[in-house]
Amino acid sequence: MARQANDGYPVVFDVEYPDGPQDRFKAAFRIIFAIPILILAATMERGTQGGFFIIAPALMIIFRRKYPRWWFDFNLELGRFWARVYAYVGLLREEYPATDDHQAVTLEIEYPDFERDLNRWLPLVKWILAIPHYIVLILLFVAVILALIVAWFAILFTGHFPRGLFDFVVGVSRWSYRVEAYAFYMATDKYPPFSLD
């Protein structure tokens, strides 16, 4: 079972702030170094684009009141892998994303207890109920892109990702993962907080 965040929400996302200075050369050409792992990640994601790993669990919850653990675990591991890729491309971490090691990126989503945690009909409307989050997150992602541009220059000149910008980018990511867990992973019926914490 995953540990819960301070507010009791069943999704935990965090990235450890780098201990020392980042390699400026690697930061300057990060997008080029990331091409192989982005190709791998896109290939893995392509297999799930048909909705097999999102729509099928929703249908199982609605009609069978089941969400097989292996299906949930696969979705969670795919989300963890993408979180490591995002942390690397977004300059949050310098180590190359592993396909199987969690590294310094934490994504934990609590496996739901169906009798207690999930309403069988809510998967039909969760994605609609999350629309206010999508609107806010779109605006926040624009701010994240600007923050990453500033951070890229800061790393090139100082070797460090400014801590305030780092915390902001991680906070927006945390918010996004909570919305994904609610609307798409079908992991909880608890409405995500409008919060970076």
Image (spheres, rainbow, N blue to C red):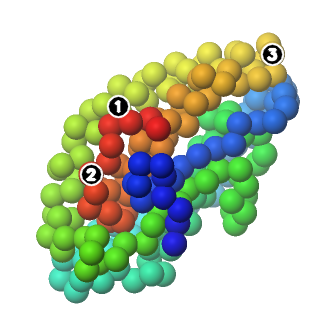
Position of residue 118 in the picture relative to residue 154 (left or right): left
Position of residue 152 in the picture relative to residue 25 (left or right): left
For the residue pair 127 and 46, the one nearer the viewer reads as: 127
Give residue 101's quadrant in the image. bottom right
Position of residue 40 in the picture relative to residue 125 (left or right): right
Residue placed under numbered mark 2 in the picture: 191
Q: Amino acid at mark 1?
A: Ile
Q: CA distance from mark 3 to mark 1?
A: 30 Å
Whether residue 115 is visible to the viewer of this picture, yes or no, is yes
Q: CA distance from mark 3 to mark 2?
A: 40 Å
Residue placed under numbered mark 3 in the picture: 158
Q: Residue furthest bottom?
A: 64
Mark 3 or mark 1, whichever is nearer to me:
3
Return the mark for residue 113.
none
Q: CA distance from mark 2 to mark 1?
A: 18 Å
Return the mark for residue 138.
1
* Image spot of residue 48 (x, y percent): 43, 66
Placement of 100 over or under 89, stated as above or below: below
Placement of 35 over or under 126, stated as above or below: above
Residue drawn at x 62%, y 16% is: 150
Q: Amino acid at mark 3?
A: Thr
Query: Which structural element holds mark 1?
Result: helix
Give residue 49's quadrant in the image. bottom left
For the residue pair 19 and 148, the one nearer the viewer reads as: 19
Query: Which structural element holds mark 2?
Result: loop
Q: Amino acid at mark 2?
A: Tyr
